[in-house]
Image (spheres, helix red, strand yellow):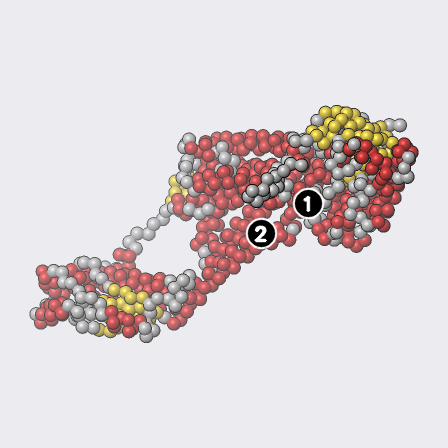
Amino acid sequence: MRSDLLTIIKKELRILKRREFLLGILMPILILYAIGNIVGTGVKSTVEEITSRGINITVICADPAPRNLSAFLSVINMINSSQNEEAKVYNITLIMSEPVNKTIGELWKSIEEHNLNVSSIIREIREIGEVFSGRPPEEKVRSLLSKGVDVVIYVPENFTWNVFLGKSTSIYTYYKSPEDPFSMFGNIKTGVVNNFIELLGKTLNYFMITRYYPNFPPNFVYSPIVEHPYTYYRGEIISGSPEQVFGAFGAGFIIPMMMFLLAIYATTTAATNMGEEKENKTLETLLTLPIRRRNIVIGKVFGMIIVATVMAIFYMAGLILYMKSLTSSVSEEGEAISISFSSMTNILSPQGIILLGFGIVLTAGIGAMMGLIAGAFSDSVRTASTISSFIIMPLALPAFFFMYVPITPGDPRLYILMLDPFMDPIVIMKGLFAGNIMFCTISVAYLLGVFFVLLYVTASLFNSERVILGGFKKKKRIPKQRFGPGLVRIKI
Amino acid sequence: MRLAVRVKDLVKRYKNFTAVRGISFEIREGEIFGLIGPNGAGKTTTLRIIATLLRPTSGEVSVFGYDITKDAEKIRALISYLPEEAGAYKDMTGIEYLKFMAEVYGIDDSSALDKAIEIADLGPDIYNKVGTYSKGMTRKLLLARALMTAPKLAILDEPTSGLDVINAVRIRNIIKNERNRGTTFLISSHNMLEVAYLCDRVAIIHKGRIFEVGSPEELMRKYDVDNLEEVFQRVVISVEE
C-alpha cells in the first residue's frame, strides 16, 4: 500500500519537471524581478540625473523688507551657506522684483527711517496688522519656465511681514510640466522640489528659533523626544512597536496571501491534473491498475499539495524579489518581511507553528480534493479549469475579503468564517496571535473533519463509474430545418 | 477447463439508453476470445465492465471466480486492460512509462522490462517523450505495457488499431505467443481477418445482444460461407430484418 502511494505521488510530482510548469513559475518571478529592476533603476537613474544636473530654481522675490530683516533672504542665505548635501541639488537664482502692492514697501521704508530695533519693528508691524499682497507676474514666470528653469517660486511682498506677525506666510510655486507627463519617473522632480519647499519651512523655523532664542540648541526643536518602543504581548515585553513586531502580519500580506495562494493552486492543479488524465485518455488505464482507488486519490492529493507548495513558495519568492529589486537594495519592505518571519518564529510557540502548518496542509489537501472532484466531472483540461473556478470563487472571495479584517477569536463572526476551509489557516493565525490555542485546535479539528469527509467522497467517486462517465459536454444543437414563407413541410 | 470469465444475463443501462441487454458468454482459461459487432453494439461497455471500470445494472460477471462488484481489487491484480482510445503520459519517455507500470505491478525483474521494450519495438525512440510519438508508436507502447506484466487475462479493445500491416501481424503473433505462455485474451475488433486468425472462439454482439458464439470455423460452417466477414454480415442483416 505504501509503495502504491509513493508511486502515485512520484507520478504526480513529475509536473514539477515539466517545461511549461517551470516556465509557469519562473516567468512571474522573472517578470516581477524585471519590473522591480526597471522601476528601481529608472528611479535611481532619474534621481542621479537630478543630482548631477541639479534643479534650476528661480526665486522672484517681491518682498521689500530690508536685506538685514528679510526672512526669505535670510533663509536662502542659510540654505546656501549650509553643508547640507540635500541643498547642493538646488541651483537657486534670485531675482528681486518690485512689490505689486506698493503699500508694504512704503511701510518698510517708514519703519527703517525711524531706525527701530527688531523688537520695536515687530511691535510696530503688529500694530499696523495684516497687509495683502498683489498677484504674481505670470508673464515673467512664463518666460522663465520656457528658458530651462524647472521651477519658479514667487515670494510675495508680505512674506517677512507675515512672519513677524506670526502668521503663516505664502509662496507661489510654478512647476514646469515633465517632458512626458505620463512617465512614472516624471513626478520625481516634483518630489525633489517639494523637498526644497519643506527645507524652506524647516530653515525658516531654524531662523526664528535662532532669532528669538539665540542660546537655545535649534536641533532640539526638531526632535525633542527619542522614542524606544516596546510592546506588551501575552504577558511578554517585546522590543519594538506593535507595527514593528507585527508589521508584516497586519499591514503586510505575505503570509495570509501565501496561504490563500496555496489553497487556490492546490485546487486548480488537481482539477487540471484530472482534466489531463481524461483528455489524454490515461484515466481508464490508471483505474484498472492494481492500486486501491483510495490510494490513487491520496497519492494525487499529496502530490498536488507538494506541487502547490512549490508554486506558492516560488510566487512569494518572486514577490519578495520584486520588492527588494524595486528599491535596488535591501529595502524597508524587504526588512519588514524578514522581521515578520523572525518575529513569527519568536512569537508563535512550536505547538502553534505545528497547528498552523497542519492547518495549511489540510486546507491545501481539501482544495486538491475539490479540484479532483471538479476534474472527475469534466472531460478536458478546459472544462476542469472552468468547473474548479466555480468552486474556488465562493470559497476564496470571502477568504480574500476577511484576510486583513481585524477580527479577534472572541468574535462570533469568526466561527462562521471558519466554515470556509480556505479561511481556516488565516483564522488559525489570528487565534495563535491572540494566544487562543483552543480556538486554533477547534479550527484544525474542523479542517480534519472536512478533509476526511471529502476524502471519503472523492474515494467513493473514484470507486464509482461516475469518474469515467461523468463529464459535462456541451450538447450539440441540431439546427432546425427552416422553410421559406408559404412552404409547407410534407411528411412522406 | 477452468473459466477465466463468466458473464450471465448482463444488463447495462445508462441514463437514456440500454447498452447491453442480458448477454451471457464464457471464456475458458488460455483461450483467445473475440467480441465482434458493429459500432454501438455494446462491445466496449462489456469490456469496461469486465475490466472493473463500469458496474453492471444487473446480471453476474466473474473473472477467475472473483465477482466483478465485490472483488474488483483482486480482479485488477489479474487483468490488463487496453482501451481502444488509450493514451500514455506525455511527459514521460517510453522507457519511463514502462518502468512506472512495472513499479505499479511490483515487478523488479528486468526481463519483464526487456520483454516490454521488445514488444514496443520503438528502437531509440523508447527514450523519447511519449508526447512526440505517432498514434501507432503510442499504441505499440500501450500494447507492451498491457503484455509486459504477463496478466492472467488481457482485455484488448481494438489491439491493432492505428498500426500498419507489418506491425499488426507482429502484434498478432505476440498475442498468440503470450496465449501459449498462459494468458487468456478477450479481444474486440472490427477486423474480421484478425479475429478469424487470432480467436479460438468469437461472440457476435449487436444492439446489446449476443446472437452467435462459436469458433470461426463453426460459424462459417453454420452459415455456409467462406469467411467470418460474411457470417457477421448475415447475422447483422438477419437481426435488422
Q: Percent from the top left, x then y, of residue A418?
A: 48, 33
Residue at 44% in and 66% down: A45
Task: Say how many tags the image has.
Answer: 2
- The answer to which image quadrant residue A12 occupies is top right
| Label 1: chain letter | A
Q: Nearer the viewer, residue A111 or A177?
A: A177
Say if A16 sits above or below B12 in the image: below
Badge 1 marks a residue whose secondary structure is loop
- The circle on residue A27 is none
Q: Percent from the top left, x then y, of residue B97?
A: 74, 46
Q: Which residue is mark 1?
A: A280
In the displayed orientation, state which residue is furthest to the front: A486
| Camera sees residue A177 | yes
Which image quarter is the N terminus of chain A in?
top right
- The answer to which image quadrant residue A169 occupies is bottom left
Q: Nearer the viewer, residue A317 or B81?
A: B81
Instruction: First in sequence, mark 1 or 2: give its number.
Output: 2
Q: Which residue is mark 2?
A: A25
Residue at 36% in and 48% down: A228
Say what amino acid the circle numbered 1 marks: Asn
| Camera sees residue B103 | no
| Label 2: chain letter | A
Marks 1, 2 in one chain: yes
Residue at 28% in and 73% down: A143
